[in-house]
Image (spheres, coloured by chain):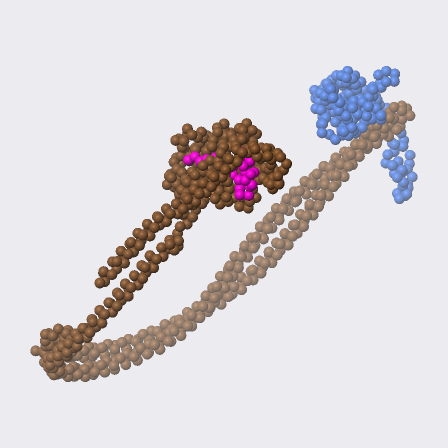
Chain colours: A blue, B brown
């Protein structure tokens, strides 16, 4: 597709965008699954997007602390007219808890569909939401393979909550088993 | 005659003095007798009235019956409120509380009177009240009663039967006491030089009774005490002693016991001085003095006698159980007592009505015995006149005798003078061997003096003879010496000429020195100018350094600005970071929503992904920028530090240059001084030249003078020869005196 020579002065913003980002205007069917990349403790981890409802930055004062709860439960919050608990994910996984002095937290809202209509929500506070990564489908489920990185991460993250491993531009990262985490958390209540 | 006359006078004086002394005692005893008689009379009258009163009061009931019959006109006169003046010993309130019931009792018992009222008064007020007649009855202490009885004609009608602490008393006295810890005061004699506080000068129990005791012990309280004060109330005295404000206190008997019973003091805090053990069986309380009758109740002169009678009767009738007696703290009233003892006390102390005894003085004495004094005076005048006449006669005789003696002396003296002149006649002709005779008494001194003069004259003549021959010999020697002197003068003159020549040579050398100094001065000036030039160059250098300093300061300021703007950049970067993060989140949320939409959202999911990727890239970029800004800041800081160092060095350099300049200035100063010194040298050499010239002149003069001296010595030789001739003549003259 040849681009006609245009006087640069007459170029509109839209045309400029079109030139700079051709993919946006020519959508391609790209295969593979979407993962959210976030840092938990000092590690990066992947989370399947399908379990997520939304992710947001939340001011610390919008989390209401609740007494008589396990230490990793930060309190109750509301979003989109739903009220649910927030869990300090690093602390839950046995890592260093999030700093209590933070003004705001990075929160992932997960949805767990139990029965036909009832769906319960849970906020997972992480150290930082980094971005989104797409993985090709065919390379999926890689069971635990012996490598150096795996070994170090394993020492910090309990294997129980790791679903699989994925290799991406950031290196080999664990995919968290969200349903299992949700189940464990709800058991505690 | 002279001795005989004064004798009778002395005798007369002695007799007169004896008579006077005798009559003073007689006068004193007379005065006492008179006053006693008056007192006796007064007492007799009071006793008479008392007797009458008692008689009347015995008849009282019948009179009382009569008063019940329709009112007689007299009753209206006596019907009024009668005021009873009460001496407030321990405060007016207390007195009112004590005696109000008695007034009520009298109002009840003497219905013919209009009623009775208590007027509490202190020691001064009570006398004034009686004098002015503002009260009708008086309840006061015996001392004041005795005074008032005479002065204001008051009549005692009853004496108090006191009841103190369960005991009935018709007598009282005074207490002298101290604090328990004042062990230095044991007896009355120890009171000398101490401070004392009493109640009132007119209070019997509170002062006068103690005064009498002290007088008996040989102490005059007004002279021997260090200080004597009067408090006016008993309680104040007790408190003053307790608080140590005074050494001892004087109060009435029972006051201490009453105050202890009221809980105001503790009795063991005090010790009574001169405790009267001999009266212990008669009197149950602490006591230092004699006992005196209790307080009398008396009527004043403006009280109608009938009312006084009724009041006396009512008082005597008062039972110990009545409210009035209880309130007053008394047992009741008895017949009017004998106050003679109080009067004795007054006489002893010479107070109250006996105060005049103290005032018997010289004026009164002379007034009384004037005739003895005038007789003595006349006798004295006659004696003196006789003595003066006798003296004058004696002196006249002595003068006549003295004149006779003088005339005889004069004649004898003249004779003796003639004799002396005859004896010394020979001396006029050069005979120094004559002698004056020493026979006469008066002229012996003159003769002696003359003999001494002729002796010394003879010695002088002998000596002159010897010395004139010696002079002659000496003159011959002198002539030779003068010759030698002349030779020496010649020699001197030659030497002076030689000295003159060498001085001229020296003068030439001095001129050479002056020239050299001048040259040195020029050189010094050159050095001075060179130094000045250097100073100017130095100044320029300093200015340059200062300029560098200014530039450095400005650069430092700009560096600071640069640091500030890089800070602003880092702020902007953090904002961008925030935006990038939010964009990432939006992209994630968008892709989540899109993936829910299934096939339809596929395209949008990819766009969202790409937006996310871009946001991630911009986050990376901001990180790089932030790092760069941090580097810039670091470098800026380094440069700033380097600048500061430079500034310090510049300051140091400035200081160095400054000090160099200062040392140069010193050099300048020194070279200037050298110049000055050189100038001074050339100037002084010039003046030296002048001095040498003057010296030359002086030398010349010296040479001339030595020549003159030569001439003079020749002249001296000549005059010596003439002197020798004169000496020879002198020898001839001395020969003439006859010496041996």
The correct choice, above or below, for B289 with respect to B726 in the image is above
Q: How many labels does the image show?
A: 0
User: Is A143 included in the stretch rendered in magenta?
Assistant: no
Rendered residue at 65%/45% (across/down)? B640
What residue span does the magenta drawing correspond to? B290-313
Quarter location, residue B444: bottom left
Of residues B242 and B455, which is closer to you in this image?
B242
Rendered residue at 89%/23% (across/down)? B598
Describe residue B385's horizontal placement relative to residue B450 as left or right: right
Describe residue B245's horizontal placement relative to residue A77 as left or right: left
Of residues B595 and B245, which is closer to you in this image?
B245
Coordinates of residue B587 in the picture (x, y in percent)? 83, 30
Coordinates of residue B676 in the picture (x, y in percent)? 47, 66
Q: Which residue lies furthest to the left in this view?
A: B740
Residue B120 at least partly seen: no
Rendered residue at 68%/40% (across/down)? B634
Residue B186 at least partly seen: yes
Quarter location, residue B274: top left
Which quarter of the image is occupied by the N terminus of chain B?
A: bottom left
Coordinates of residue A133 in the picture (x, y in percent)? 81, 26
The correct choice, above or below, for B427 with respect to B60 in the image is below
Quarter location, residue B276: top left
Coordinates of residue B52 in the picture (x, y in percent)? 50, 37
Of residues B360 and B36, which is closer to you in this image?
B36
Which quarter of the image is occupied by the C terminus of chain B?
A: bottom left
Rendered residue at 44%/70% (across/down)? B682
Describe residue B300's horizontal placement relative to residue A63 as left or right: left
Describe residue B192's horizontal placement relative to residue B412 as left or right: right
């Amino acid at each position: 597709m040849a681009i006609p020579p245009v006087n640069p002065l007459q170029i509109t913003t839209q045309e400029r965008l079109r030139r700079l980002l051709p993919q946006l205007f020519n959508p391609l069917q790209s295969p593979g699954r979407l993962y959210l990349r976030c840092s938990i403790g000092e590690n990066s981890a992947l989370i399947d997007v399908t379990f997520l409802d939304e992710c947001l930055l939340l001011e610390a004062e919008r989390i209401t602390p609740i007494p008589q709860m396990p230490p990793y439960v930060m309190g109750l919050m509301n979003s989109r007219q739903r009220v649910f608990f927030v869990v300090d994910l690093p602390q839950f996984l046995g890592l260093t808890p999030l700093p209590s002095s933070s003004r705001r937290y990075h929160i992932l809202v997960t949805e767990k569909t139990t029965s036909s209509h009832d769906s319960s929500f849970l906020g997972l506070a992480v150290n930082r939401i980094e971005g989104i990564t797409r993985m090709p489908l065919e390379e999926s489920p890689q069971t635990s393979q012996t490598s150096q990185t795996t070994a170090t991460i394993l020492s910090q993250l309990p294997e129980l909550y790791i679903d699989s491993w994925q290799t991406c531009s950031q290196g080999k990262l664990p995919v968290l088993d969200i349903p299992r985490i949700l189940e464990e958390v709800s058991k505690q209540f | 005659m002279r001795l005989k006359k004064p004798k009778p006078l002395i005798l007369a004086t002695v007799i007169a003095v004896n008579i006077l002394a005798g009559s003073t005692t007689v006068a004193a005893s007379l005065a006492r007798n008179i006053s006693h008689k008056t007192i006796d009379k007064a007492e007799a009258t009071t006793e008479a009235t008392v007797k009458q009163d008692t008689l009347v009061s015995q008849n009282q009931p019948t009179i009382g019956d009569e008063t019940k019959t329709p009112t007689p006109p007299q009753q209206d006169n006596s019907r009024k409120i009668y005021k009873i003046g009460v001496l407030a010993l321990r405060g007016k309130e207390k007195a009112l509380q004590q005696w109000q019931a008695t007034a009520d009792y009298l109002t009840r018992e003497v219905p013919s009177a209009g009623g009775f009222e208590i007027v509490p008064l202190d020691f001064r007020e009570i006398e004034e009240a009686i004098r002015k007649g503002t009260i009708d009855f008086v309840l006061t202490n015996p001392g004041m009663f005795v005074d008032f009885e005479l002065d204001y004609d008051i009549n005692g009608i009853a004496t108090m039967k006191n009841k103190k602490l369960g005991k009935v008393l018709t007598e009282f006295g005074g207490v002298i006491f101290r604090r328990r810890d004042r062990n230095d005061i044991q007896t009355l004699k120890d009171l000398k030089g101490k401070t004392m506080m009493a109640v009132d000068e007119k209070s019997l129990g509170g002062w006068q009774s103690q005064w009498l005791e002290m007088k008996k012990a040989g102490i005059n309280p007004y002279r021997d005490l260090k200080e004597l004060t009067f408090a006016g109330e008993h309680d104040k005295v007790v408190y003053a002693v307790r608080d140590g404000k005074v050494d001892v206190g004087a109060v009435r008997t029972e006051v201490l016991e009453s105050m202890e019973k009221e809980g105001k003091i503790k009795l063991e805090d005090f010790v009574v001085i001169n405790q009267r053990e001999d009266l212990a069986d008669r009197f149950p309380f602490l006591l230092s003095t004699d006992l005196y009758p209790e307080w009398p109740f008396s009527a004043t002169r403006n009280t109608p006698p009938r009312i006084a009678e009724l009041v006396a009767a009512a008082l005597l009738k008062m039972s110990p159980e009545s409210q009035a007696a209880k309130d007053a703290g008394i047992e009741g009233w008895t017949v009017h007592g004998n106050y003679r003892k109080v009067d004795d006390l007054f006489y002893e102390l010479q107070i109250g009505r006996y105060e005049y005894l103290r005032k018997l003085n010289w004026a009164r004495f002379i007034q009384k015995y004037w005739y003895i004094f005038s007789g003595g005076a006349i006798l004295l005048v006659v004696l003196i006149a006789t003595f003066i006449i006798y003296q004058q006669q004696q002196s006249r005789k002595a003068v006549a005798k003295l004149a006779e003696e003088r005339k005889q002396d004069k004649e004898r003296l003249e004779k003796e003078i003639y004799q002396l002149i005859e004896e010394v006649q020979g001396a006029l002709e050069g005979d120094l061997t004559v002698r004056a005779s020493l026979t006469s008494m008066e002229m012996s001194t003159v003769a002696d003096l003359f003999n001494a003069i002729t002796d010394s004259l003879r010695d002088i003549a002998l000596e002159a003879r010897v010395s004139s021959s010696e002079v002659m010999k000496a003159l011959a020697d002198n002539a030779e010496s003068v010759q030698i002197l002349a030779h020496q003068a010649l020699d001197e003159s030659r030497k002076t000429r030689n000295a003159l020549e060498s001085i001229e040579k020296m003068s030439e050398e001095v001129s050479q020195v002056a020239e050299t100094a001048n040259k040195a001065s020029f050189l010094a000036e050159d050095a001075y100018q060179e130094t000045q030039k250097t100073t100017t160059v130095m100044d320029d250098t300093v200015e340059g350094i200062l300029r560098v300093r200014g530039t450095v300061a400005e650069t430092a300021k700009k560096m600071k600005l640069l640091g500030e703007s890089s800070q602003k950049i880092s702020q902007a970067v953090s904002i961008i970071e925030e935006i990038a993060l939010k964009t990432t989140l939006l992209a994630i949320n968008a892709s989540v929503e899109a993936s829910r939409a299934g096939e339809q959202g596929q395209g949008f999911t990819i766009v969202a992904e790409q937006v996310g990727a871009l946001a991630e890239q911009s986050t990376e970029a901001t990180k790089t920028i932030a790092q760069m800004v941090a580097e810039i800041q670091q470098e800026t800081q380094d440069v700033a530090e380097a600048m500061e160092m430079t500034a310090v060095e510049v300051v140091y350099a400035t200081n160095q240059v400054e000090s160099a300049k200062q040392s140069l200035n010193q050099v300048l100063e020194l070279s200037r001084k050298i110049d000055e010194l050189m100038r001074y040298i050339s100037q002084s050499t010039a003046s030296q030249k002048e001095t040498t010239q003057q010296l030359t002149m002086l030398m010349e003069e010296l040479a001339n003078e030595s020549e003159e001296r030569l001439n003079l010595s020749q002249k001296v030789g000549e005059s010596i020869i003439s002197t020798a001739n004169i000496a020879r003549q002198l020898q001839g003259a001395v020969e003439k005196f006859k010496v041996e």
